Image: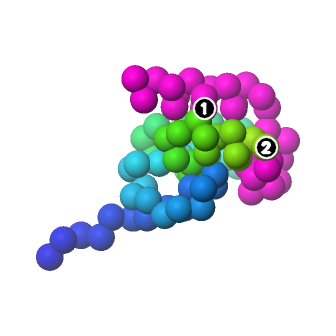
């Protein structure tokens, strides 16, 4: 029997994908936001497709800020942008 792959929803396009195909953004208990490349960091996770289109949508709608109920630093979006561009090379 095949093991079910965990599915998560992208905050940009709302489509469900395998967890490992998405980028995980995590907020720890101190309210620090990090990009979780391993998917193992503890804290509240949010997922986004590996696409700039979805990232732009998330930035525009402030979806991440609403999810984590915290002001998101531009630096985090820039880091995400970098991660996405890097992985799409």
Q: Is residue 5 magenta?
A: no
- Which secondary structure class fits the magenta region best? helix
As measured in the structure, the alpha-carbon distance from the residue carrying label 1 to the one carrying label 2 is: 14 Å
- Whichever of callouts 1 and 2 sits on the residue coming sooner in the sequence is 2
Is the residue under label 2 in contact with that under label 1 (CB below 8 Å)?
no
Q: Is residue 88 left or right of 78 when viewed as pictured?
A: left
Q: Quadrant of the C terminus?
A: top left
Q: Which residue is mark 2?
A: 60
Q: Nearer the viewer, residue 88 or 38?
A: 88
Q: Secondary structure at mark 2?
A: helix
Magenta segment, which residues?
61-89
Which quadrant of the view contains residue 3? bottom left
Badge number at residue 69: none
Query: Looking at the image, which residue is at 47% across and 48% down?
Result: 22
Mark 1 crowdedness (10 Å alpha carbons): few <14, some 14-19, many ≥20: many
Work out whether residue 84 can be spotted: yes
Q: Position of residue 86 (x, y in %)?
A: 46, 23
Mark 2 crowdedness (10 Å alpha carbons): few <14, some 14-19, many ≥20: few
Q: Nearer the viewer, residue 31 or 47?
A: 47
Badge number at residue 80: 1
Q: Position of residue 28 (x, y in %)?
A: 66, 46
Query: Looking at the image, which residue is at 43% across and 64% down?
Result: 7
Which quadrant of the view contains residue 55? top right
């Amino acid at each position: 029997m095949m093991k079910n792959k965990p599915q998560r929803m992208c905050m940009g396009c709302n489509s469900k994908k395998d967890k490992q195909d998405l980028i995980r953004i995590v907020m720890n208990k101190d309210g620090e936001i990090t990009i979780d490349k391993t998917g193992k960091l503890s804290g509240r996770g949010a997922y986004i497709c590996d696409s700039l289109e979805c990232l732009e949508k998330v930035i525009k709608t402030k979806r991440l800020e609403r999810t984590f109920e915290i002001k998101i630093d531009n630096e985090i979006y820039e880091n995400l942008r970098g991660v996405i561009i890097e992985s799409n090379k």
